[in-house]
Amino acid sequence: MAVLAAFRAPRIDRRTLIAAGLAALAALIVLTLTRPADRVSVLVASRALPAGAALDAGAVEVRQMSSGDGLVGGTALGELEGWTLLAPVAAGEPLLASQLVDPATAAAPSSMSISVEAAHAALGSITAGDRVDIYVTWSAAGGERGRTELLAAGVEVLESRPTDDVGGGDRTEILFAVDSDLAPLIAAGYRMGELDLVRTSR
């Protein structure tokens, strides 16, 4: 029995166990609090930019931030050439996606809508973001068809939605981005002829 007593495992004090556990917990908390947060790349103004300024490679730079919510990601650096600002941005201030206007919209801030038969608008498959060529077939005397010609090319579609015609046919309502030159052309073609839309890109 004396031999067995000699090999008995040492007794660990309960207070020692508690202290070791608290030390491990404290170390874990410190590690969690001091661990650097994940960073994301965003675009910031490299200099003070006024409202209406067109962006170029020298106007913005990439910076690491803790959050990119609502901001323009750094990967978009090469895609913003010619985009403009709705509001001024101070040097070093992140760009907000809501502050940017694409070149097509900036050049054509106005919009107008028309309604055409789906058969004359790529079977109604035209969607927002598409660009279309607009052809007009002018009405001739006696109800006959007149000449057909290209009215406008590469017109941006802002919105498109199907609608039912009173006569039972399918129609598509389309909202275009227009300027002061394009709007009267489309209006004249719509009222004095028949329009056909050819989707050229999407």
Image (tube, helix red, strand yellow):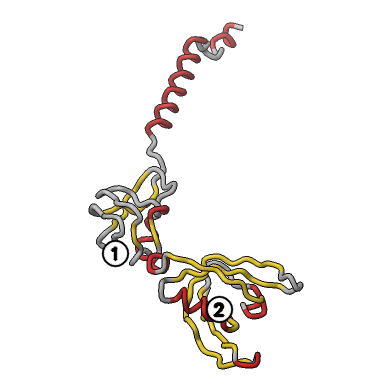
Quarter of image, res 101: bottom left
**In the foreground, 151 or 40:** 151
Amino acid type of the residue that numbered disc 2 sits on in the rendered structure: Arg
Horizontally, residue 201 falls left or right of residue 143, namely: left
**Disc with the residue nearer the chain's start (2 vs 1):** 1
Horizontally, residue 141 falls left or right of residue 88, namely: right
Whole-percent x, y for residue 77 in the image: 35, 61
Question: Which residue in the rendered view is the most extreme toward the right?
Answer: 168
Question: Which residue in the rendered view is the most extreme toward the front?
Answer: 142
Other-residue count near label 1 (Cα within 10 Å), few / some / many at <14 / 14–19 / ≥20:
some
Whole-percent x, y for residue 95 in the image: 35, 52
- Residue under the point 62% across and 66% down: 161
Residue on which the image places disc 2: 199
Secondary structure of residue under mark 1: loop
Q: Which mark is residue 56?
A: 1
- Residue under the point 29% across and 57% down: 60
> Where 71 sits versus 29, above or below?
below
